[in-house]
């Protein structure tokens, strides 16, 4: 089954403790992206990657890192999480850029205390 | 800032057509118009996309204005399951591919 998976689905952590949210897709997609969703602010793009070893900043990249060493995986790294990074995070992928639909993962709800 | 403008919310009766508008007055010639929706407690899902011509698929129709500065997502016969937030976005065909979702339109379906 074609899908985007994220782990963990739920995470409660403390300020400053490094964490990684994994994202994996099985559709051989080139484009992958991370979003965060907050009440009243909608979906905002954090980082995106157009191919292996190619990543770029979205609208809200501060406090996040990503890597794209393999085509299927696109982990989101929070080196020193802070409470303002408490949010719902979505990973997405698509074959290419403009003319292709994005497939979204189920989301990761992160709480930083 | 979002490059599209949508009403915050809309209401429609069940089994009637729904027309969801989107303005994108600064659209460039090669920007694709995409629509997604997000059901409660789920991730966004793709609905439809187009470039210049109107498009139909099993979920909806997309009507694109001749000048491409606006578009309308048409749900032909709304059901309660169509209650969701609908996002209209532009996918930039320039060098970068940032995607800006905006806040979308919350569609309420009345039984």
Image (spheres, grey):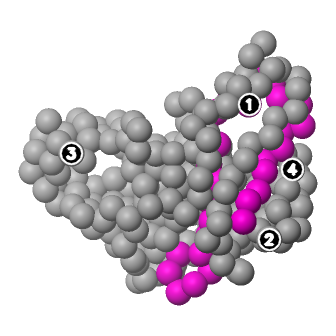
Give the left or right position of residue A24, taking residue B74 as reference: left
Q: Earlier in the sequence, mark 2 or mark 1?
A: 2
**Chain letter of the residue carrying label 1:** B
- Could you give the CA–CA distance between mark 4 and mark 1, rounded to whole angstroms? 14 Å
**Chain letter of the residue carrying label 2:** B
Image height check: is A42 above or below A95?
above
Q: Badge 3: how crowded within 10 Å, few (<14), some, or many (20+)?
A: few
- Could you give the CA–CA distance between mark 2 and mark 1, rounded to whole angstroms? 29 Å
Q: Which residue is mark 2?
A: B67
> Which quadrant would the C terminus of chain A be assigned to in this image?
top left
Q: Badge 2: how crowded within 10 Å, few (<14), some, or many (20+)?
A: few
Q: Which residues are magenta?
A: B69-97
When asked about the image quadrant of residue B38, the answer is top right
Q: Is residue A51 visible?
A: yes
Q: Which residue is mark 3?
A: A84
When asked about the image quadrant of residue B15, the answer is top right
């Amino acid at each position: 089954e074609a899908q985007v998976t994220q782990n963990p689905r739920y995470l409660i952590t403390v300020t400053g403790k490094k964490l990684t949210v994994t994202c994996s897709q099985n559709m051989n997609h080139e484009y992958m992206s991370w979003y965060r969703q907050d009440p009243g602010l909608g979906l905002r793009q954090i980082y995106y990657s157009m191919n292996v070893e190619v990543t770029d900043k979205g609208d809200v990249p501060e406090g996040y890192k990503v890597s794209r060493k393999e085509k299927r995986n696109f982990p989101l790294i929070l080196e020193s999480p802070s409470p303002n990074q408490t949010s719902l995070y979505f990973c997405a992928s698509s074959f290419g850029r403009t003319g292709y639909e994005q497939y979204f993962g189920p989301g990761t709800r992160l709480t930083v205390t | 800032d979002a490059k599209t403008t949508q009403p915050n919310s809309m209401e429609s009766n069940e089994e009637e057509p729904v027309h969801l508008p989107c303005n994108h007055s600064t659209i460039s010639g090669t920007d694709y118009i995409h629509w997604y929706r997000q059901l409660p407690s789920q991730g966004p899902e793709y609905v439809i996309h187009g470039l210049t011509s109107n498009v139909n698929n099993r979920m909806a129709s997309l009507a694109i204005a001749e000048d491409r500065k606006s578009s309308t997502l048409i749900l032909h016969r709304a059901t309660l399951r169509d209650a969701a937030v609908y996002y209209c976005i532009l996918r930039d065909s320039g060098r970068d591919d940032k995607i800006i979702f905006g806040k979308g339109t919350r569609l309420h379906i009345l039984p």
